[in-house]
Each structure stands twice: as structure tokens, then as C-alpha cells.
Amino acid sequence: MAPWGYSKENGPATWHKDCPIANTGVRQSPIDLITTGQTCAKYDSNLKPVIVSYPAFSEATFLNNGHSVQFQPSAGNLSELSGGPLTKKYKFEQFHFHWGNNDSEGSEHRVNGKMYPAELHLVHWNSESPNFSSFQEAVGSNDPHALCVLGFFLKVGAENASLKPITDLLSKVKNAGSSVSFPGKFDLKAVLPETLTDYYTYDGSLTTPPLAECVKWIVFKEPIEVSTAQMEAFRAVDDGHGKPITGNYRPPCPLHTRTVAASFK
Ligand SMILES: COc1ccc(CNS(=O)(=O)c2ccc(S(N)(=O)=O)s2)cc1
Ligand SMILES: [Zn+2]
């Protein structure tokens, strides 16, 4: 089977062939975050603000893996996540993006059916579990909260100066499989909204193969603004088959018996 992707031949509707959990899983991601009605997100007053400790990264690789662009700091990075719905401390692993080929599509999660032009995922793994001691082991474990991914919607507006070092680098990793070592320091904290208080959270999975159901998802209500030029830079990244990556997002999956909690009314 050709490696998975987002085209008609190897896209989300075909992933079940190599990953049966795509169709049989009952906690798949992404989902449509519904805010009113029967199956809507329920306000939980116990949900605290998410706490991130992201010292500026000094050494990292920026990679085009053919289905997204990924920023991966060297193993020694000390960035951590806690608070929110979490009971443990998580270590930062990498961040990457999902986007569309126009501003009306691109995000993986949706809000009442609305898609944003892109979504940023900050991937972390539980560094306090007795069952695993590396990211790879965490992905392979059956622990329901082995990973925690923070999702931020991107919307088109003013240029995002904090993300400019990343969007300016996209042309350097135009070809699938290419990577560059990130020049200088990158301050991820500056990219995020000031307060990490308003979010949706639910139990889900990786949104790409292996679709492991090991993710505590935290999706923030407040989008991050980027300029049209910055969005266009994502749309010029190639997928390794001579075409731009456009639409590297999985459609929403059934909620089944899950509930979504909201940290805000
Ligand atoms: C066994 O070793 C492995 C196995 C699998 C991976 C995939 N990479 S990954 O786990 O970071 C993610 C895939 C999809 C993510 S999303 N869109 O849900 O945030 S994160 C890496 C190492
Ligand atoms: Zn992702």
C-alpha cells in the first residue's frame, strides 16, 4: 500500500486498510465541537488554565514530511505542559500544522461545523508515566492519555510576527523529505494567546496513521491570526508527488459515547 496521504488514492477514506481503527475506533479524532444542543460541550468549572513552560528553543529541525511541516527541537529540550485537565506533567515533542487550499477549509477540528483555514498542533507526551519513558513508547502504549495535543485554530488577519520565522522557512522545505536546522532561537510561547483559559477537551486519537487512541485533546477557543501571505506560504509546500500539500486535514469522526468538556461558559 502506498504510504498514506490526503489524495483520493491514499487519503482518510483509505486509511482503514492499514489502520482498521480508522473505522472501528470509538475515540477517533478530529471531531466537530458542538456548542449547543444535545451532544454539546459541557461547561466544567473544575477545568483550570493550561500551563506551558516553553523556554525559547535553541536547536531544532524543521521538516517537510510530505504530509505536513513539523518543528522538532533536539531531545534535550525542557519544554513542559501541565494544568488544564491534566494530572501529570507532559514533555514537548514537536509541533506541526494542518491547512487547506483556501480560507474556508483546513482545520481538523470544527466548531459547529465551521472550519478554520488552518490548525496548529503542539504534541506532548506524559513524562511521568511508569509505563513508558520515550515519545515513541508513549505512542505505542495503550495509555489513553499517553499524549496531549494542544490545538490552536489559525484565522486570516494581521501578520503574525511570532510565527514569521516559521512561515519564512516554508520555502526552504518546499520539497517533501527536505529539512533544515532551525536558524537561531524560536519562542513558541510568543505564538500562543496570552491566556490559555478557554478550551474544549476530550479523549481522542492521533489524526493521522497510526490513529492511536492515546491523546488527551485540548483545543483552544481563541484563534491565532496569520496573514494571507503566511497562509499562502503553507499552500506552496509540496507533497512529494509534484503537487502542493493542500488539505492535509482528516474529516470529523463520530463522537460515540464521548463527552466534550469546555472550560468556559
Ligand atoms: C512509533 O513511533 C511513532 C509513531 C507515530 C508517529 C506519528 N507522529 S506523531 O505521533 O507525532 C503524530 C501524529 C499525528 C498527530 S496529530 N495530528 O494528531 O497531532 S501527532 C511518530 C512516532
Ligand atoms: Zn496534527
Image: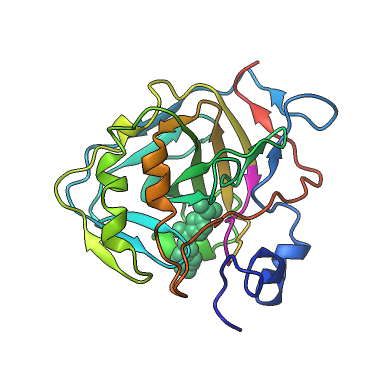
Q: Position of residue 124 (x, y in %)?
A: 43, 48
Task: Give residue 23's quadrant in the image.
Answer: bottom right
Along the line of sight, the residue nearer the viewer: 212 or 16 = 16
Give the residue displayed 74% in from the left and 59% down from the top. Answer: 25
x 35%, y 72%: residue: 177
Residue at the image position 26 percent from the left and 52 percent from the top:
169
What's the magenta region?
Answer: 203-209
Residue 131 seen in the figure: no
Asked whether 34 or 166 is in front, the reply is 166
Q: Main secondary structure of the magenta part?
A: loop
Q: Viewer-proximal residue, 114 or 95?
A: 114
Q: Quadrant of the C terminus?
A: top right
Q: Is residue 232 above or below residue 38?
A: below
Q: Position of residue 163 (x, y in %)?
A: 31, 39
Name, please, the residue furthest toward the right: 38
210 relative to 77 in the view: left or right: right
Residue furthest left in the image:
184
Protein image colouring: rainbow
Q: Is residue 208 visible?
A: yes
Relative to residue 32, is residue 9 depicted above or below? below
For residue 189, what is the image quadrant? top left
Measured as percent of width and height from the top left, residue 263 is found at 60, 22
Q: Nearer the viewer, residue 250 or 46?
A: 250
Q: Is residue 212 left or right of residue 95?
A: right
Q: Position of residue 264 (x, y in %)?
A: 61, 18
Q: Is residue 183 magenta-colored?
A: no
Q: Is residue 97 above or below residue 82?
A: below
Would residue 45 appear left or right of 198 to someone viewing this image? right
Q: Quadrant of the N terminus?
A: bottom right
